[in-house]
Image: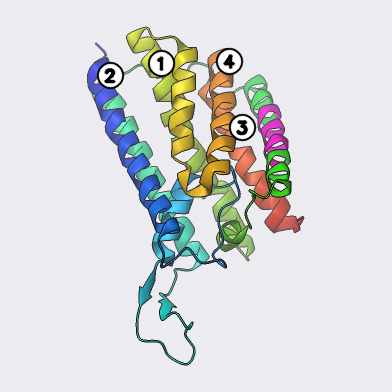
Amino acid sequence: MPDWATFAGFAGVVLALLLLLAHASKAAVSDDAVSRTDRPRPRPGSVDPAVAEVHVSLSNRVVDPPTSDDPADGTRATPQLSTMALLANVAVSQGAFGLLLLAGAWFTQIPTAAFGVSEPVLSASTLGVGVLLGTALYVANEVGASVGDRLGVGADEGLREALAPDTIGGWAVLLLLVLPVIAGFEELLFRGVLVGVFSVGFGVSPWLLAGLSSVAFALGHGAQGPAGVVVTGVLGFVLAAAFVLTGSLLVVVVAHYLVNALEFLVHEGVGVD
């Protein structure tokens, strides 16, 4: 018999850990030692919180006596991991969170259907809806970013550039491993658990849960600034609405993946500004 309450508590711990990491990332970005005018910020809605967290943690500066090659303020950047090591770090951390959720679901006997996973798991119609939704969200995200730039609340793309591989193998790792892991974990948590499982297990309106989960999703992107929080919250609610309407976790995983993958491919792969 499913133990809904125990799993809800377990999922709450995972969510709290994720949000704490996001908050630490935001604090690091705003710290005097790292918040310089030449410090890149993630473009609103373009990078998942886990990516920003790891990047910020690897980019913190330490104060040492200045040398002739150091900035006048006495700060010196610590060595950063390579792009491949950074991507591997992200994949491992997000994969670990996802496995924790799956282990908790198995232990508490939560049915897979509550997550939006049912037979058949994969179908042409499911993939088609996910691709259409993801493409539309990507276009909307680009429009929102352009509007933000015009209003003076945009940001440069230094973080995305740091994550973009420069080899074919690196692109394969990014597109076939890292981005699928991120999309899978975040949709499992924010849509599959916070909307699907909580709705089925506790009889709460899925639309109410869609709104609440989107707020949590937006807060997880706090390091992107106010514009990033707003854009991410809207995108999150659209994904949650799609989950409620289709009842399919795969649809929103595919859509989430495409939003991130298309941005990397268009801006870093093709080089479109």
The label shown at residue 246 is 4
Dot 3 amino acid type: Ala
Question: Which residue is tagged 2?
Answer: 109
Q: Does residue 116 appear anywhere in the picture?
A: no
| Mark 1 vs 3, N-terminal side | 1
Boundaries of the magenta span: 132-142
Q: Nearer the viewer, mark 2 or mark 4?
A: 4
Check the picture and name the quadrant holding the C terminus.
bottom right
Task: Report crowding for label 2: few under 14, some 14 to 19, many 20 or more residues within 10 A (C-alpha).
Answer: some
Using the image, determine if residue 153 lies above or below residue 39.
above
Check the picture and name the quadrant holding the N terminus.
top left
Q: CA distance from mark 3 to mark 4?
A: 13 Å
Q: CA distance from mark 1 to mark 3?
A: 20 Å
Residue 44, located in which quarter of the rendered image?
top right
Using the image, determine if residue 152 lies above or below residue 33.
above
| Mark 1 vs 4, N-terminal side | 1
Question: Which residue is tagged 3?
Answer: 255
Dot 1 amino acid type: Ala
146 left or right of 171 in image:
right
Q: Which residue is drawn at the image coordinates 27% and 34% (left, top)?
A: 13
Q: Which residue is drawn at the image coordinates 41% and 77% (left, top)?
A: 75
